[in-house]
Amino acid sequence: MAHIIKDVWATCGWRLSLQRGLYIMGFFSKIMAAFTGKAPGGSDRYLPIYVLDHRCREPIAGQIDLLNELSLAEDEGAGYYVRKVLHTSGAGRCFGQVEVQLWLDNKKQIKQHEVQGGRWLTAEEYAAELERRTAEAEAAALQPAAADAADEESKKSNRE
């Protein structure tokens, strides 16, 4: 019986020291977070951008990492600047790129944008372009099937 009590006491003591250690580690991690600052998660960290490539007529979505990709703008107190090059998927053996330059205010909201090799799209325009591209791909997929069916019909009529 004494042996069982001794084992229970040792286990409980270990649990208490583990809990105490986790509490201390949690305390230190909170202090470190206050000094280093935590990165915002989710939608606060990334700024989505949408463009349409002129060469390939392909809509492209990208994102700007607001913590790592921004530079201070040259003008004093002007906010931030970022330059990003977005590439097309290469579908249809068309490889294009669009250069986007953004100027943001101190609250990291877009003040001005310039696009070379394409045009700026809103989220709604991007969705519409994706639908248009999907419809074109479906139509192109149906055309060879219709042409094959017509060829089969013509071969049958030639045999008769």
Image (cartoon, grey):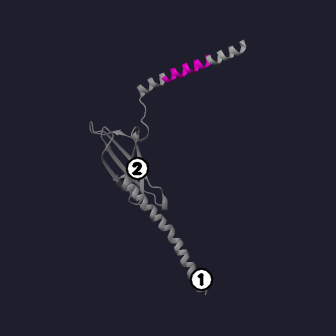
Q: Tag 1, which secondary structure?
A: helix
User: Which residue occupies 45% across, 55% down?
Assistant: 88
Q: Relative to residue 105, is residue 116 depicted above or below?
A: below
Q: In the rendered view of the protein, which quadrant contains the N terminus?
A: top right
Where in the figure is residue 107, as x and y percent of width and height? Answer: 32, 38
- So how many labels did they put on this image? 2
User: Which residue occupies 62% across, 18% down?
Assistant: 12
CA neighbours of label 1 inside 10 A, class few (<14), some (14 to 19), many (20+): few
Residue 71 in magenta? no
Span colored in magenta: 13-26
Residue to which mark 2 is pinned: 85
Name the amino acid, label 1. Lys
Q: Which mark is residue 156?
A: 1
Q: Nearer the viewer, residue 3 or 145?
A: 3
Residue 17 in magenta? yes
Q: Is residue 101 left or right of residue 24?
A: left
Q: Nearer the viewer, residue 10 or 90?
A: 10
Q: Is residue 71 left or right of residue 3?
A: left
Distance from the alpha carbon under mark 2 to that under mark 1: 53 Å
Q: In the rendered view of the protein, which quadrant contains the C terminus?
A: bottom right
Predominant SS of the magenta segment: helix
Where in the figure is residue 6, as x and y percent of width and height? Answer: 68, 14
Determine the image quadrant of residue 125: bottom left
Determine the image quadrant of residue 18: top right
Name the amino acid, label 2. Val
Q: Is residue 123 left or right of residue 4?
A: left
Give the farthest residue toward the left.
Answer: 76
Closer to the N terminus: mark 2 or mark 1?
Answer: 2
Where in the figure is residue 150, as x and y percent of width and height? Answer: 54, 78
Front disc: 2 or 1 = 1
User: Which residue occupies 52% across, 71% down?
Assistant: 144
